[in-house]
Image (cartoon, rainbow, N blue to C red):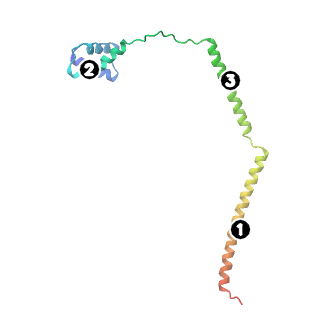
Amino acid sequence: MELKQAHKYVERFFDGKTSLADEQALLAYFLQPKVDKTLMHYKAYFNAIAKQREQRFPGNFTPVRKTKIVQLKRLSVVAAAAIAGVFLLQQIAITSQPTPEEIAFEKFKLNMYLVSEQLNKSKQGVAYIETFNTATNKYLKKE
């Protein structure tokens, strides 16, 4: 592989635009003992890739197969969860309606706020009358 072509392949490789054949050519170039000095820092990277490709799993791998019983159990759990969810939502909807006692309490509370508001207004009026009496007593002579 020519040096110019190797630079082009390396650039395309790190941009993610190479084909499998280009990657094989790059790997073959970097596995040879003589590599150009400008590309020498990539040699360790491609050697690591080659070592990773050589590694194999030493054990015996057998994937777990799903049986009909497992699928039936999953389906029954999903159905039970759906039924429980619907039941809970209905219970929440039923309990969210206020009872007559709660309605009466809310009306009582509203009336107490109105009474409190009127008492506060009358307290301000009494304070005004008291100020008026103090001012008039200053100017009136007592005998």
Task: Check the image and report above or below for 123 versus 101.
Answer: below
Marker disc for residue 122: 1
Q: Of marks 1 and 2, which one's residue comes earlier in the chain?
A: 2
Label 3 vs label 1: CA separation? 63 Å
Image location (x, y in percent) of residue 45: 30, 20
Query: In the image, what residue type sits under mark 1?
Result: Ser
Residue shown at 67% from the left, 22% from the top: 79
Task: Check the image and report above or below for 19 versus 93.
Answer: above
SS for dot 3: helix
SS for dot 1: helix
Count neighbours of disc 1 (C-alpha within 10 A) and say few if under 14, some if 14 to 19, many if 20 or more. few
Task: Check the image and report above or below for 128 versus 53.
Answer: below
- Name the image quarter holding the C terminus: bottom right
Tell whether 114 sits left or right of 47: right
- Residue situated in front as seen by the camera: 34 or 86: 34
Tell whether 94 sits left or right of 55: right
Label 3 vs label 2: CA separation? 60 Å
Query: In the image, what residue type sits under mark 3?
Result: Ala
Residue 132 position by quadrant: bottom right
Count neighbours of disc 2 (C-alpha within 10 A) and say few if under 14, some if 14 to 19, many if 20 or more. few
- Residue situated in front as seen by the camera: 48 or 123: 48
Q: Which residue is mark 3?
A: 80
Image location (x, y in percent) of residue 122: 71, 68
Q: Of marks 3 and 1, which one's residue comes earlier in the chain?
A: 3
Image location (x, y in percent) of residue 134: 66, 79
Marker disc for residue 8: 2
Foreground label between 3 and 2: 3
Q: Of marks 3 and 2, which one's residue comes earlier in the chain?
A: 2
Image location (x, y in percent) of residue 117: 70, 61
